[in-house]
Image (cartoon, helix red, strand yellow):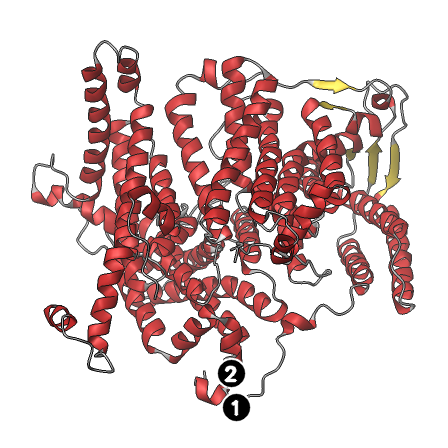
């Protein structure tokens, strides 16, 4: 950094700037006027709006607002208590529980955050990867359902040694997710059908398919049961706990990290990744350059579906092992879209965004339990972050930042 | 996978994207043949013993129509033959390069549907009036949503947020309707709520040029979060005062309501349904027959050209999606002011996405989108009726139908759906 600043003062005698210097300057410019500041302010603004909502619906605050003219101090005290209470509960539920008796207990929320983050990260990678090819994968829910059903079926149906069983279930999930997403890719490549519509519709088709299978004894439903639920997954197919029985964190988080590394390698280092990015930037130009655009659409959706499928497996084999249900996706399919948007479709960005939203989830449930604030506030904050982030000019207008330097 | 360099040697050829749009006329013949084959297979492989009764009247009818009882399988076969004739005629017409006429489609649809019902409801009674009026009731929010979607997309703004508008409308109608104890106040509140969602959509999609699909999806999540949060925090604890809205009751229209079969279905409904008839007519008329409609369509097809002749693209788009938001909001009011007199979290159950499907299946045309929404409403109500009778068709597959049909529609397998040319593209002047 210092060398870059140092050479800045010299007159530009050299015709070509060193590439690494260029990169530093790019980064600096991005921090000053673009991505990072805007990202931070978007999160801040969303949290402010969330605070207003929390305060406005707090009973104490509304009670004191009745006599705000007489004793404004009460009102501000109540507002502060409501908001402070909410966010400290969020912190205690997601990072470190300051009320715990021991460190082992105190650190538990952090493992919960990682547990919630794992499926968000892999599913976010699936959505983000498709984004990079210019495709909008809204089918996370359907892909997770199909993958979860496949993983769960393998998980309860077979008797196999532990490692083999788990691997087989994971592979089944990836194949199911890939095929379900591949339909959208194939239709887009062959007929030009818009993937947004196809993936939305496939979500519902998957829902009813899995629901149908779960209510038929001959298919997935547990024997002698009337509930739309399958048998529990056998121990040999479950994702093992990472830190012992005291915590819920399971191998899914490690799989998510591996997936991040894989996605990074795929996008930044492989020839397919190059083609994906080329198609995403400009499909016409990519086609002119000899890239088979249709094949890239199909391949990227297959890979995206496999990644989202891992999120489905993560739920069925790790988080809720009591059997397949139709709500196994737990909203992750849609959350993944916001994760991918916040992470700007870059693997490391998605990792960070997934952990942030995982923390929101873990903390949100804690907030609901201790402060009686519905966990839905997390959805509000999450979607506001993405909205603000998607419109940098809006953030610049609100915070009076300088306009982005033209490149 | 080969490397990019080796791919460069492959000769460039047109993508299939452009190749599908060839013969449009074929689709009628293809659909009719495929659907007939489907029915034929089902009836041939799962024959049903017994009779099917169609109940055509409700007890309160002015003139009572008789019940019709027919042998199930025989009726199905007779109607399959009718369907085969229609399909064959359609193929003959296609060979002669002639369009399949509407009357043939109507005869075919009726024949197919009655044949299917005769088979599926074997041994039971089909309450025809209940089936159809129930379908209309289920379709009302879908039609409002689809009209809103058609308006927005015709002006070039993709509206994925229909679901959010319905949900916001339902919420506002319940809250304001209860607070003021007035159905009409609730309806107006629903329209305002839908408009507000549209305003946010416009702010991001039109002013800040954010991808419209992204804004739409995120807005749906935002509205789900907001309404669920407010429901738990405000509505549920004060259910007496804030979540027990008055209901629109059914109003019988004097003469029309007494027509057998049609009267009880269409003219013994609530005020919201009559508003729906008006909305369909007004939207269709103004979109195709007024200067405003021409401008909306121009802005959606070719904004630059529209701008050149002095149409304010931005203003036209804003105005259109705000109106569209109000229309969709009315659909939301139907949930809380007619169907169920209280709000519940996520009570639309993704109906906005079915409305979106209706927009596409209806080819961005208000009348066709309305018909598509009615068809989807019919499919989901039929599923309910059939599961009561205990039919051989799993209800999940009936519920799946709208979505599958839409996938086929966008894939061009049943006629190509072409969106307005500038749909989804933000307009940047200059």
Residue B137 percent across, percent down from the top left: 68, 31
**Nearest to the observer: residue B160 or residue B141:** B160
Where residue B341 sits, quadrant-wise, is top right
Judged from the image, the secondary structure of the residue bearing numbered disc 1 is loop
The label number, if any, that marks residue A290 in the structure image: 2
User: Is residue B112 positioned above or below B58 on the image?
Assistant: below
Position of B13 with respect to A74 (left or right) is right
Q: CA distance from mark 1 to mark 2?
A: 7 Å
Protein chain holding label 2: A
Residue drawn at x 32%, y 40% as measured from the top left? A46
Q: Residue B302 appears in which quarter of the rendering?
A: bottom right
Q: Residues within 10 Å of mark 1 (few under 14, many from 20)?
A: few
Q: Are marks 1 and 2 in contact (CB under 8 Å)?
A: yes
Tell me if A276 is positioned left or right of B415 in this view.
left
The N terminus of chain A: image quadrant: bottom left
Q: Quadrant of the C terminus of chain A?
A: bottom left
Is there any visible trace of residue B348 in the rendered image?
no
> Residue B328's quadrant in the figure?
top right
Residue B9 marker = 1
Between A268 and B208, which is closer to the camera in this rendering? B208
Identify the residue at horizontal 52%, vertical 66% (top origin): A182
Give residue B237's position: percent from left, percent from top.
39, 19
**In x, y percent, where is residue B317?**
58, 45
Label 2 element class: loop
Does residue A156 appear anywhere in the picture? yes
């Amino acid at each position: 950094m210092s060398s870059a600043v140092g050479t800045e003062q010299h007159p530009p005698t050299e015709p070509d700037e060193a590439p690494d210097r260029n990169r530093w300057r790019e980064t600096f410019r991005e921090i000053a006027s673009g991505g990072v500041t805007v990202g931070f302010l978007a999160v801040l603004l969303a949290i402010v709006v969330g605070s207003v909502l929390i305060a406005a619906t707090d009973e104490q605050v509304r009670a004191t607002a009745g006599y705000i003219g007489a004793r404004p101090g009460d009102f501000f005290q109540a507002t502060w208590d409501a908001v402070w209470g909410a966010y400290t509960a969020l912190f205690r539920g997601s990072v470190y529980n300051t009320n715990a008796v021991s460190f082992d207990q105190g650190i538990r929320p952090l493992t919960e955050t990682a547990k919630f983050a794992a499926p968000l990260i892999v599913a976010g990678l699936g959505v983000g990867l498709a984004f990079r090819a210019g495709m909008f994968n809204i089918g996370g829910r359907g892909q997770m359902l199909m993958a979860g059903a496949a993983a769960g079926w393998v998980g309860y149906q077979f008797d196999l040694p532990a490692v083999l069983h788990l691997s087989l279930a994971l592979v089944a999930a990836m194949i199911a997710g890939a095929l379900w997403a591949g339909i959208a890719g194939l239709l887009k490549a062959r007929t030009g059908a818009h993937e947004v519509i196809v993936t939305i519709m496939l979500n519902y088709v998957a829902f009813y398919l899995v629901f149908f299978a779960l209510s038929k004894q001959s298919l997935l439903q547990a024997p002698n049961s009337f509930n739309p639920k399958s048998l529990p997954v056998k121990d040999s197919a479950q994702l093992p706990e990472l830190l012992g029985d005291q915590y819920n964190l399971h191998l899914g988080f490690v799989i998510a990290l591996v997936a991040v590394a894989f996605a990074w390698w795929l996008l930044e280092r492989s020839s397919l990744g190059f083609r994906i990015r080329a198609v995403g930037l400009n499909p016409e130009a990519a086609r002119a350059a000899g890239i088979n655009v249709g094949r890239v659409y199909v391949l990227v959706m297959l890979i995206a579906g496999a990644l989202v499928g891992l999120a489905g497996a993560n739920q069925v084999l790790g988080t809720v092992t009591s059997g397949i249900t139709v709500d196994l996706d737990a909203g992750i399919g849609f959350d993944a879209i916001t994760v991918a948007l916040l992470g700007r479709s870059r693997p490391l960005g998605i990792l960070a965004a997934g952990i942030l939203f995982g923390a929101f989830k873990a903390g949100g449930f804690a907030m609901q339990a201790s402060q009686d604030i519905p966990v839905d506030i997390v959805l509000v904050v999450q979607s506001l972050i993405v909205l603000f982030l998607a419109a940098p000019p809006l953030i610049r207008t609100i915070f009076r930042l300088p306009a982005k330097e033209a490149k | 996978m080969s490397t990019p360099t080796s791919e460069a040697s492959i000769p460039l050829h047109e993508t299939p994207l452009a190749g599908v749009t060839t013969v449009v006329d074929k689709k009628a013949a293809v659909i009719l043949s495929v659907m007939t084959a489907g029915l034929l297979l089902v009836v041939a492989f799962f024959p049903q013993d017994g009779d099917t009764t169609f109940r055509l009247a409700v007890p309160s009818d002015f003139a009572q129509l008789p019940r019709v009882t027919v042998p199930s399988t025989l009726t199905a076969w007779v109607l399959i033959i009718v369907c085969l004739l229609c399909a064959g005629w359609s193929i003959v017409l296609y060979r002669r390069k002639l369009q399949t006429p509407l009357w043939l489609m109507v005869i075919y649809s009726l024949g197919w549907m009655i044949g299917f019902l005769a088979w599926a409801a074997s041994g039971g009674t089909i309450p025809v009036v209940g089936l159809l009026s129930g379908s209309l009731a289920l379709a009302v929010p879908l039609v409002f949503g689809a009209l809103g979607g058609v308006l927005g997309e015709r002006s070039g703004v993709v509206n994925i947020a229909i679901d959010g508008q319905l949900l916001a409308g339902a919420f506002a109608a319940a809250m304001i309707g209860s607070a003021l104890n007035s159905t009409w106040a609730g309806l107006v509140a629903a329209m305002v709520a839908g408009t507000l969602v549209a305003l946010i959509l416009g702010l991001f999609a039109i002013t800040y040029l954010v991808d419209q699909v992204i804004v739409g999806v995120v807005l749906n999540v935002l509205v789900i979060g907001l309404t669920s949060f407010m429901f738990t925090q405000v509505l549920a604890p004060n259910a007496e005062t804030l979540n027990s809205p008055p209901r629109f009751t059914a109003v019988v229209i004097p003469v029309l309501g007494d027509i057998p079969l049609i009267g009880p279905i269409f003219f013994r409904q609530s005020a919201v349904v009559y508003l729906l008839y008006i909305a369909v007519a007004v939207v269709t008329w103004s979109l195709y027959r007024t200067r405003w409609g021409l401008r909306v369509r121009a802005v959606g097809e070719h904004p630059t050209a529209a701008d050149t002749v002095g149409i304010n693209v931005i203003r036209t788009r804003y105005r259109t999606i705000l109106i569209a938001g109000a229309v969709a909001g009315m659909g939301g009011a139907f949930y809380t002011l007619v169907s169920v007199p209280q709000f519940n979290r996520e009570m639309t159950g993704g109906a906005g996405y079915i409305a979106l499907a209706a927009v596409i299946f209806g080819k961005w045309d208000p009348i066709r989108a309305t018909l598509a929404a009615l068809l989807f409403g019919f499919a989901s109500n039929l599923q309910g009726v059939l599961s009561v009778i205990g039919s051989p068709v799993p209800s999940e597959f009936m519920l799946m139908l709208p979505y599958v049909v839409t996938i086929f529609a966008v894939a061009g397998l049943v006629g190509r759906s072409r969106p307005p040319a500038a749909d989804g593209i933000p307009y940047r002047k200059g």
